[in-house]
Amino acid sequence: MTNIPEHGFIKPLAIFMLIWLFTSCSSDRNRSSQYVIEVDPTSFTEINLNDCKSVVISDTTLLIGVIRQALSDNNYHYIHSNYKLFLFDKDGRFICKIGERGRAGNEYSSLHYFWLEGESIYLYDFNGGKIFNYSTNNELLSTNRISRNGDNEYAFTYIVPLKDGYLGRCVWDGVAGISPALAYYSSDFKFEHTIGDLSINSGLRLGFPLTKSKDGALYWNPFGNKIYFIDDTQTVSTRYTISFGKYSFPDLASYKDDYDVLDLAMNEDWRRNHAGSFSYVFENDNITYFIYGMDDKMHILKYNCKTHRYNNFRLETSDDETIQSCSSDGKNIYIYVESEKGLVIYNLGK
């Protein structure tokens, strides 16, 4: 399917790629289609975050620090930082801290990851082998202990709901050198079986390359150019292939493992002239947002699956600002920025 650059967007959106590591389609959205998006990353609309709506979290007693993960829904911002999970309303007011860190049975030893499911907040204690289910009132609703019963079972690093259970991104097996990328887990988080034939060849973790979509889930290798779709029948297919032409990252198949590509990405001169390192993908109705980096700048590629047109945006910040993370509530894109004023959450709109 042909895609066309679209430069006349009303009030340019904005842009982001997670920096904690190194700073088409019909109206009914036929999910069986594969979208090939050819992008010129040097052609973009520049956005200054200071022109966007924002709220400031200036309560220094919270000591938020570096943000590892952020999520949003219609009512709240959920911010994971310093092994703690903070809940704020959309005006930036602190609501509560979810869960407690410690060694007791109802405490987590390390907060690795969290996700939202219905009215619940799930906290994943990878080291402690536990998953906690909390309400937004910080009420502990349930605790699940994670156990591994055999050599052919795979633990998960990230997980999203899929039909009656969960889709997980597997932990890399450093001894074997290669591991399946995806597996299916029961509703009580027990390993069921691997899914598809995708694999991982390193323990690198860039962003959170697994996300819930409207009718399934999306998975990707941040250094690759393909975004995969997993439906409720656990079938894996390529949904998006993104090409930046001569600015693309190299084909992963030509490298021993992800670390070789990381060596390239850590080179400032090489990074200046190549686009990639996908950190987040958001699907909103007929619009999909891809968060990527080029020239040490954060970009958002906004793709319309109905018209096959795209907008490419690059984010500009003040000298005292550092981008920490981003999220979407299904309607808006939010950028979380550390500044002299505190933590600023910018609302980029639709």
Image (spheres, rainbow, N blue to C red):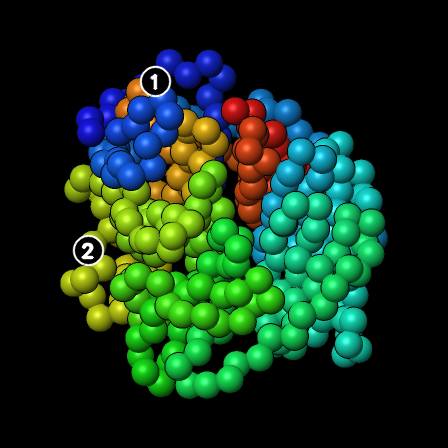
**How many C-alpha atoms fall within 10 Å of the one at disc 1: few (<14), some, or many (≥20)?**
some
Question: Which label's residue is closer to the chain start, 2 or 1?
Answer: 1
Is residue 45 depicted above or below 144 in this figure?
A: above
Q: Residue at x 18, y 62 (%)?
A: 253
Give x and y (percent) for residue 197.
Answer: 27, 64
Query: Which kind of residue does numbered mark 1 sit on?
Result: His
Q: Quadrant of residue 327?
A: top right
Residue 158: x, y in percent?
A: 51, 61
Left or right: where does residue 12 sit relative to residue 132? Answer: left
Q: Is residue 250 above or below residue 83?
A: above
Q: Dividing the picture into quarters, in which one does residue 283 lie?
A: top left
User: For numbered disc 2, what is the local secondary structure?
Assistant: loop
Relative placement, left or right, of 225 versus 219 is: left
Residue drawn at the location 60% of the way across and 66% of the way down: 188
Using residue 246 as the reference point, say whether residue 319 is left or right of it.
right
- Which residue is the site of mark 2? 251
The residue depicted at 77 percent of the width and 71 percent of the height is: 107
Q: Quadrant of the N terminus?
A: top left
| 3D distance between C-alphas at marks 2 and 1 | 29 Å
Asked whether 86 or 136 is in front, the reply is 136
Marking on residue 36: none
- Compare residues 267 and 160 and report the one nearer the observer: 160
**What element does badge 1 sit on?**
loop
Q: Is residue 300 above or below residue 158?
A: above
Q: Which residue is disc 1 drawn over?
A: 7
Residue closer to the observer: 342 or 109: 109
Q: Position of residue 26 (x, y in %)?
A: 31, 24
Q: Amino acid at mark 2?
A: Asp
Residue neighbourhood size for the residue with mark 2, other residues' Cα within 10 Å, grouped as few (<14), some (14–19), many (≥20)? few
Q: Residue at x 35, y 63 (%)?
A: 195
- 173 or 30: nearer the viewer: 30
Left or right: 62 in relation to 324: right
